[in-house]
Image (spheres, helix red, strand yellow):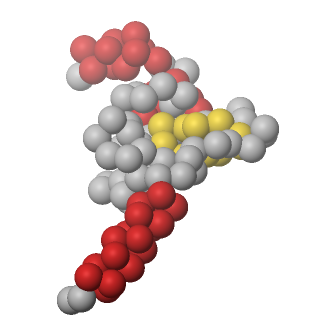
Amino acid sequence: MTHRHALIAAALAGVCAHAAAQDMGTPKADQEACYGVAKAGQNDCGTATHGCAGVAKVDNDPNEWKFVAKGTCTELGGSLEAGRGAQEGARHKRGQGKAGAAKTEAQQ
């Protein structure tokens, strides 16, 4: 590879890296981030474990999120807080919450 080709490759790599680093996590006014509802590969932005959209490894990971219409997150089984996600949100949807879930588990 000539010096010229190396410079061109480095410039292209820089442009690609800059494009990938652009903030893709800006919601529209009528949206909110909803944790625990993103399917594998369909999250909207990075988390503490990665910095990219579209790299969620599993469905409904409580730390992965995607934008949804405001007011619909808990209806979808998600949470507005990281780490709670689909299952915790589903308990709240049924009106159980943490206390109700603990009570249900204790009864079993």
Residue at far right of view? 29
> Does residue 44 lie above or below 29 as drawn?
below
Left or right of residue 29, residue 20 in this image: left
Q: Quadrant of residue 17?
A: bottom left
Question: Which residue is painted at 32% across and 46% down in the image?
Answer: 50
Question: Where residue 107 appears, x then y in whole percent?
Answer: 27, 16
Residue furthest out toward the bottom: 1
The quadrant in which residue 95 appears is top right
Residue 41: horizontal and vertical position, in percent?
A: 40, 62
Q: Is residue 43 visible?
A: no
- Is residue 19 something one can see in this rendering? yes
Question: Looking at the picture, does residue 34 appear above or below residue 41?
Answer: above
Q: Nearer the viewer, residue 60 or 30?
A: 30
Left or right of residue 32, residue 17 in this image:
left
Q: Is residue 13 left or right of residue 34?
A: left
The quadrant of the picture occupied by the C terminus is top left
For the point 56% across and 47% down, which residue is it? 23
Q: Position of residue 75 (x, y in %)?
A: 62, 37
Residue at 36%, 58% (x, y): give it: 55
Q: Nearer the viewer, residue 17 or 48?
A: 17
- Residue 76 left/right relative to 31: left
Looking at the rendering, which quadrant does residue 54 occupy?
bottom left
Q: Where is residue 34 drawn, in percent x and y?
A: 55, 38
Q: Quadrant of the N terminus?
A: bottom left
Please name whichever residue, 87 or 82, is drawn nearer the observer in this view of the structure.
82
What is the tally of numbered marks visible in this picture?
0
Residue at x 37% of width, y 19% of height: 101
